[in-house]
Amino acid sequence: MSTARPPGGEHEIDAPAFADEAEGEEEQEAPAPRPRPPARRLTWQRLTILPALLLLLLLGTWLWFEQADLDTISRNALSGGLVAKALWQHVELTAISTFFVLIIAIPLGILLTRPACRRATPLAMTIANMGQATPAIGLLALLVIWLGTGTRAALIGIIVYAVLPVLANTIAGLQANDPALLEAARGIGMSPLGVLARVELPLAVPLILAGVRTALVLNVGTATLATFGGGGGLGTLITTGITTQRMPVLVLGSILTIALALLVDWLASLAEALLRPRGLEAGS
């Protein structure tokens, strides 16, 4: 006996098989997600806007001085390369103090996050907080009484005042690391020094760089007080302008200090963007 087929049975298609094929075609036709382009570390706005504003500020200051009527006292305070000398002294004070802040605060922050020294962390942070809470001019006066006038007293005062941001950020960055990640690094046979150099410090770089950037700007501002201890710098122009009541001298010293602080902050932001590990660029 032959089994009767329904009409059109020769062209009958299994419905589940057809659905599977359709789904497979849809999956093949669906466009693959495009890979996200890598985040740009430096944009043209970051590279150009602040330098352009600084150039406009300095150009406007120069044009104002060109038409200003300077008396003999003002000319004597601004002639003979005194402005360039004060600016160079200020840059030296900032660079040298920042160097010593880095070689003191970062190793100390690493040491205080090791198990053997963690108990000393509150004491170290208290001392660092006291150093920054002390008025800078009062700290400098005490150092001058102890060490005498000169660059050494000014440098020590600037260093003590700027240690806290770098130290605090180094400790915070190292303590914020995921313990599971550190345990995994130890589990694959890395030594404690290898874990520190290849895992902990790279992950803490963003916070450490933020502390360094803060310390740089602090150093530029605090270096203006070095003149009271015989350290020179742009504070010499500011104090001369105040004591002699010569507004052009005061304005020039103030504008150069502001421009230097903004320039240092801009350079630090570029270094922060370039040195940040690529895996930590969260949508920047």
Image (cartoon, rainbow, N blue to C red):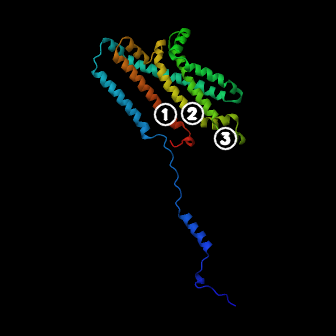
Give 2 or 209, whichever is nearer the viewer. Answer: 2
As measured in the structure, the alpha-carbon distance from the residue carrying label 1 to the one carrying label 2 is 12 Å
Label 2: few (<14), some (14–19) or many (≥20) C-alpha neighbours in 10 Å: many
As measured in the structure, the alpha-carbon distance from the residue carrying label 2 to the one carrying label 3 is 18 Å
Residue denoted by label 1: 269
Label 3: few (<14), some (14–19) or many (≥20) C-alpha neighbours in 10 Å: few
Amino acid type indicated by mark 2 = Leu
Res. 134 in view: yes
> Which corner quadrant holds the N terminus?
bottom right
Residue located farthest toward the bottom when viewing the structure as drawn: 1
Q: In the figure, 212 relative to 8: above or below?
A: above
Label 1: few (<14), some (14–19) or many (≥20) C-alpha neighbours in 10 Å: some
Amino acid type indicated by mark 3 = Leu
The image quadrant of residue 167 is: top right
Amino acid type indicated by mark 1 = Ser
On the image, the x and y values in percent for residue 105 come to 59, 25
Horizontal side, residue 196 vs residue 261: left or right: right
- For the point 62% across and 72% down, the residue is 16
- Asked if labels 1 and 3 touch by Cβ distance under 8 angstroms, the answer is no
- For the point 33% across and 11% down, the residue is 73
Q: Earlier in the sequence, mark 1 or mark 2?
A: 2
Q: In the figure, 67 relative to 277: above or below?
A: above
Please tell me whether mark 1 sits on a helix, a strand or a loop: helix
Residue denoted by label 3: 181
Q: Earlier in the sequence, mark 3 or mark 1?
A: 3
Horizontal side, residue 56 vs residue 132: left or right: left
| Mark closer to the observer (1, 2) | 2
On the image, the x and y values in percent for residue 181 come to 67, 41
Residue denoted by label 2: 207
Please tell me whether mark 3 sits on a helix, a strand or a loop: helix
Please tell me whether mark 2 sits on a helix, a strand or a loop: helix
